[in-house]
Image (spheres, coloured by chain):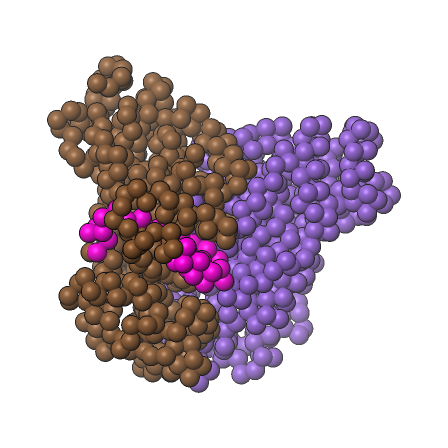
Chain colours: A purple, B brown
């Protein structure tokens, strides 16, 4: 079935042992696709290195043999980047796990790439600290995958994306060279910042094997409110007000349009809208602070000012952790509902904030006119320019046209066809709408320079 | 004198006109070196493009002719990166200036690379906002230079280095290709993040011509204190305490050792030590907040807690802007004193914070023992791992040995020989102490891929 060299397989088996190399029936369905489950294909060989040295050995051998490899972390991606293509070996980093060091003075943690995100969060918490990267897949995604895809998630407004949380990486180049840049300093301008090559390039330029992460103190207080705003321009004014009044304490600013709120509450009997009106845009706001004696009063006063100024028409402050959870269940309800929507297009797009009203209004009108009975669920993060949209007609023949309609509008507004999920295989054909020819050519130059034989995650990202 | 092609010069003169191309006596001394003034050499030709198109034209022509070019911003660098080498044309971006757009909702500013930093700070302030990159050279350094060198400065602890403040760049590659990635979104994972190639690579991979910068709200309050700590381990505990209690409001944490304070106050009659003791490490702390009614009381309480815990033995809160300025004059006094120290070695190094006590103690003892009558001035930022040191013996023959002594210790502690100033020409020979062979080889791979003829800032950064 697979056109691979017996000599290469023998070499790898000797190095990796029985646990390190799976073939045929030993290979479970989990290695066949990422969470998109698009074009699932069980690979013929799964390599499971247990050390950086193993990864280097595998790549050197595959490079010499011209054998293509796809890298798999937690396989929680949504763009098919980790899904094997015909003829590829899969390399899973699931054995390359563990936390090597926590430095409370320097606020750093050194980890191996296969470590699940949640394990890292918990280890930070055990040390009285915090690793603030967080996303729904925390239990199964790995830090190596988070770094390779520059993951975003729930705290980007305050802490930035994965790139901002990484001080150093160790990576293995496609030819097996180990480049160890495990820097622990916030300031280091000794030559090019090589880690940037491996963050967010979806494993196309090298495999991250270890990383030094930034840790932060735990906040001493937190509060949440659900607010209702009359329209998007008022939401933008609300955001400006909160940034001035709460500073970096503003840790979440999540938007839900009426179409989203109505659909989620109608589908999920245990999820409710805490605001006594279905006509407004809901904004879920979180505030994290350092002053237990005054933070709640400050938060209330700031929201009161927002109401006086007319940015919002109503606000409900959570009075308990249970109420905070209830607010988030409305926001996270999409996770339950989305899989049940047949033939839905899922968008993860961004545009400059001042183009957001034009995007939402124009897109909504155009889709409603073009597709009879379309269901739209509109929600997003706004503060980091990120909008999510689910569009379902129930007719699979509509999907391509829906994708083109939205992505072309995003391109016109100089936005991004992928705010946080990456490109992988699935979004390659839309990349030209967000990137110029010269940008894509430069991506090709980098790929050719670092992976001249094109063996590492071939065909991903670059059209 | 210069071995250049008349045809190339003619081509450039036709495109750039008389203001855009200077030769011979038209060329002032300012083009001969950066602020280090090391190895000054007046270039034979200075090119002064007024647009991105001009920059692209120049590079395409020079690439075709194999003509080397050195790029000059504000020439405030300290590592010789902008100083012409024999045979090089100089290209100054001094005409490529101006602010193109400020977007208060998206908190972005789009600027041309030759714009002075201070102009950008003032334009942000005029819009009621803030661009938080700040360094002593603000009046003459340019944003293009700041980006190319990933400048640090006074607010790194809160806002990060230049890299963290740039959302998008337009750059011209060594062959004249314009790569415009003027992204305005916090979230954009559509392919490789190409701007990272040009940030901090000191112009070796391309010339930044425009950029989209991040803006922030202005803080509503600010306060400053000078504290005295018994030793460095207590200073580290103080830092941990402030990070927990003040969060991101902690905006400066500047250290001055007794040797520094005694020397500066003895040399500058108008600079005083506000603490009634010469035996302690001084820590200048700034706090920026959003709550005019409670911030000062919070700051006082947090410092009081630090004293109760024994992290500090004394603290003086500034009661006026004048007192804040006085605190900073002690910290900035090095700027007046350093130029008067004959034959001094100037260090800009970083090590992981928990290695800092070992670095300072070991380095001080070793230098004092090896060099009779050496004067050491020790100061730094700590929170971002950055230590500055001035070491003077008055004997130029000692300099090489002093540099080697310190840099080798930094390398042993896995630190950086350049925390914020970059490598340029001057620090190339020490780069191997902070970077492995495989890291330097990867820098060479990138340089060869983007600048195959080696015409752009040749010989800088990479040994």
Q: Is residue B355 above or below residue A412?
A: below
Q: Is residue A82 left or right of residue A436?
A: right
x 74%, y 37%: residue = A89
Q: What stretch is highlighted in magenta?
A: B337-366
Q: Is residue A273 above or below residue B210?
A: below
Given residues B132 and B4, the one toward you in this image is B4
Q: Is A17 positioned to the left or the right of A211 in the image?
A: right
Q: Is residue A377 visible?
A: no
Quarter of the rendering containing residue B383: bottom left
Residue B248 within the magenta-colored segment of the rendering: no
Examine the rendering and report whether any part of residue B344 can be seen.
Answer: yes
Residue B391 percent across, percent down from the top left: 31, 53
A183 lies left or right of A64 = left
Which corner quadrant holds the C terminus of chain A?
top right
Camera-side residue of B329 and A138: B329
Residue A53 placement, left or right of B456: right
In the rendered image, residue A261, in percent from the top left (x then y), is placed at 56, 67
Direction right: furthest residue: A25
B47 over B353 or under it: above or below: above
Q: Does the magenta stretch include residue B342?
A: yes
Report the residue at 38% width, 70% height from top: B249
Question: Who's the residue at 69% across and 55% down the image?
Answer: A97
- Looking at the picture, how far across and down is residue B302, in whole percent? 39, 79
Q: Where is residue A165 in the image (x, y as percent from the top left)?
A: 51, 57
Q: Is the magenta stretch mostly helix, strand or loop?
A: helix
């Amino acid at each position: 079935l697979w056109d691979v060299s017996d000599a290469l397989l023998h070499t790898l088996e000797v190095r990796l042992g029985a646990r390190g190399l799976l073939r045929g029936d030993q290979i479970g369905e989990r290695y066949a696709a990422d969470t998109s489950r698009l074009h699932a294909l069980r690979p013929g060989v799964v390599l499971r290195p247990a050390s950086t040295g193993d990864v280097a050995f595998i790549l050197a051998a595959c490079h010499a043999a011209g054998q293509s490899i796809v890298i798999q972390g937690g396989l929680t991606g949504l763009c098919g980047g980790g899904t094997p293509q015909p003829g590829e070996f899969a390399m899973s980093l699931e054995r390359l796990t563990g936390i090597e060091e926590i430095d409370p003075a320097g606020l750093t943690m050194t980890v191996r790439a296969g470590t699940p995100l949640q394990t890292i969060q918990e280890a930070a918490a055990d040390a009285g600290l915090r690793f603030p990267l967080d996303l729904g897949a925390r239990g199964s995604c790995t830090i190596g995958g988070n770094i390779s895809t520059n993951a975003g998630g729930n705290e980007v407004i305050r802490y930035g994306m994965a790139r901002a949380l990484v001080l150093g990486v160790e990576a293995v180049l496609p030819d097996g060279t180990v480049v160890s840049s495990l820097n622990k300093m916030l300031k280091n301008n000794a030559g090019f910042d090589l880690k940037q090559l491996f963050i967010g390039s979806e494993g196309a330029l090298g495999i991250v094997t270890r990383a030094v992460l930034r840790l932060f103190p735990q906040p001493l207080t937190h509060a949440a409110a659900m607010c209702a705003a009359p329209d998007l321009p008022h939401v933008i004014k609300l955001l400006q007000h909160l940034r001035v009044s709460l500073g970096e304490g503003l840790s979440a600013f999540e938007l839900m349009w009426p179409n989203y709120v109505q659909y989620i509450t109608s589908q999920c009997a245990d999820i409710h809208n805490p605001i006594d009106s279905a006509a407004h845009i809901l904004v879920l706001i979180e505030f994290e602070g350092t002053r237990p004696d005054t933070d709640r009063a400050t938060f209330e006063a700031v929201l009161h000012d927002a109401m006086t100024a007319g940015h919002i028409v109503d606000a409900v402050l959570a009075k308990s952790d249970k109420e905070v959870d209830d607010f988030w269940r409305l926001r996270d309800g999409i996770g339950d509902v989305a899989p049940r929507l047949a033939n839905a297009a899922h968008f993860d797009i961004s545009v400059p904030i001042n183009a957001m009203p034009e995007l939402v209004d124009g897109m909504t009108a155009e889709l409603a006119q073009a597709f009879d009975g379309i269901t739209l669920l509109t929600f997003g993060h706004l503060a980091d320019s990120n909008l999510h949209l689910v569009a379902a007609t129930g007719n699979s023949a509509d999907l391509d046209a829906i994708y083109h309609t939205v992505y072309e509008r995003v391109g016109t507004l100089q936005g991004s066809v992928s705010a946080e999920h990456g490109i992988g295989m699935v979004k390659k054909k839309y990349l030209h709408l967000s990137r110029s020819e010269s940008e894509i050519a430069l991506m090709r130059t980098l790929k050719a320079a670092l992976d001249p034989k094109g063996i590492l995650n071939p065909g991903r990202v670059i059209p």
